[in-house]
Image (cartoon, rainbow, N blue to C red):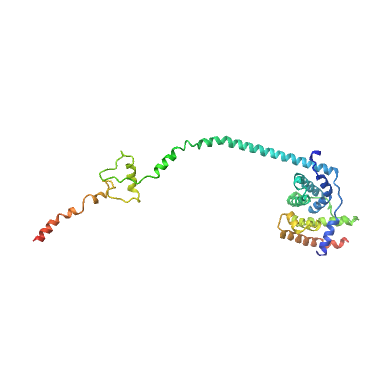
Amino acid sequence: MERFRVDGFDEFVAARWSALLHVARLLTGGDRQRAEDLVQEALVKLWFVWPKIAEQAPEAYVRTVLVRMAARSARRRWWGERPVGELPDRPGPGDLSSAVAERSRLEAALAQLPPRQRAAVVLRYCEDLPESQVAHALGCPVGTARSHASRGVARLRLILSGTVGAVG
Amino acid sequence: MDDFEHELTRMMRDSRQPDPFRAEQRERLYEGIRVRRRSRMLWRAGGSALAVAGLSVVLALLPGTGSRSAPADRGPLPTTGPTAGPTPPPVRPSPTTAPSTSKPPAGPTSTTSAGTPGYAPTPTSRPPDAGMSTTSAPPPTQPARGPSPSFTEGGSD
């Protein structure tokens, strides 16, 4: 493992792991395992280009890779549905943590969006990126990115309208 | 931003959990790097072997195509080209000289000049056995010479 070490890569990963995992989790609609897989894959890709972009914007590169991989993996059929015995995201009556309940609701609502709308909303409202960077990460024109974000927000408004009031 | 968008931003940021980069995740990351690096090397080696094989096939086929286009084989072609191109205008054969095959320049030029529309057909250049030779050889006034004496005879009357 020592021979794979490059200057600054480990420090970058250790510093940004938590934030990248959070974004990946939102991009996958709350699927933690899949989010961790996406971050791992994105960081493997980053390792190969690290000497070129270490001084530029490695986080933007990882973010772009994450968004595109999340959209690609969402198109795969086996990511679409997972048969489970119980619904894991719904908080039970004995769940006292309102933060966990709110996060679960948000992730369940995000999971109902199309991948590109979800990515546009996450990058715009969670990462607070300008529209031009959202468009760059999505690989589309600025107007299209703006449209994705506005439609995603409108749909989230409908989905969460019945539950946001009950959060507090 | 309206209230819902502010609320959405707050929900997204508050849902973030501190998740340190653990040792097993580091191991898994470097394992992924090692596997990807090995597969890349294999792809490169396969690509190089394919390129070398293709190059060797091309080099093996190249001598065969080179002997086909040797300049020695195409030598006679330029020599016949210039002589046939600027062919001087055919020498008008005299009516006495019939097209004979014994003279090399006269044979082909007389046949080509007869069918070429660029050349003005002269009675002297036509072969004597052609159909038009009857108009030039015997003058049409010869049959009219018969009655002319009778005309003169009638006039004298």
Name of the residue lying farthest toward the left: B157
Kindly tell me whether residue A1 is visible in this rendering. no
Give the side of residue A132 with respect to residue B102, left or right: right
Give the residue at x 80% y 62%. A157
Kindly tell me whether residue B143 is visible in this rendering. yes
Compared to residue B50, the image places residue A111 above or below, namely: below
Give the residue at x 81% y 39%. A2
* Nearest to the observer: residue A68 or residue A127: A127
Give the side of residue B99 with respect to residue A117, left or right: left
Q: How many marks?
A: 0
The image position of residue B107, as x and y in percent, is 32, 42
Q: Quarter of the image holding residue B108? A: top left
The image position of residue B3, as x and y in percent, is 83, 64
The image position of residue A8, as x and y in percent, is 81, 45
Q: Quarter of the image holding residue B88? A: top left
Give the residue at x 84% y 58%. B11
* Nearest to the observer: residue B141 or residue B119: B119
Give the side of residue A121 with respect to residue B134, left or right: right
Q: Which image quarter is the C terminus of chain A in?
A: bottom right
The image position of residue B19, as x and y in percent, is 86, 49
* Nearest to the observer: residue B1 or residue B70: B70
* Nearest to the observer: residue A147 or residue B117: B117
Compared to residue A12, the image places residue B152 above or below, namely: below
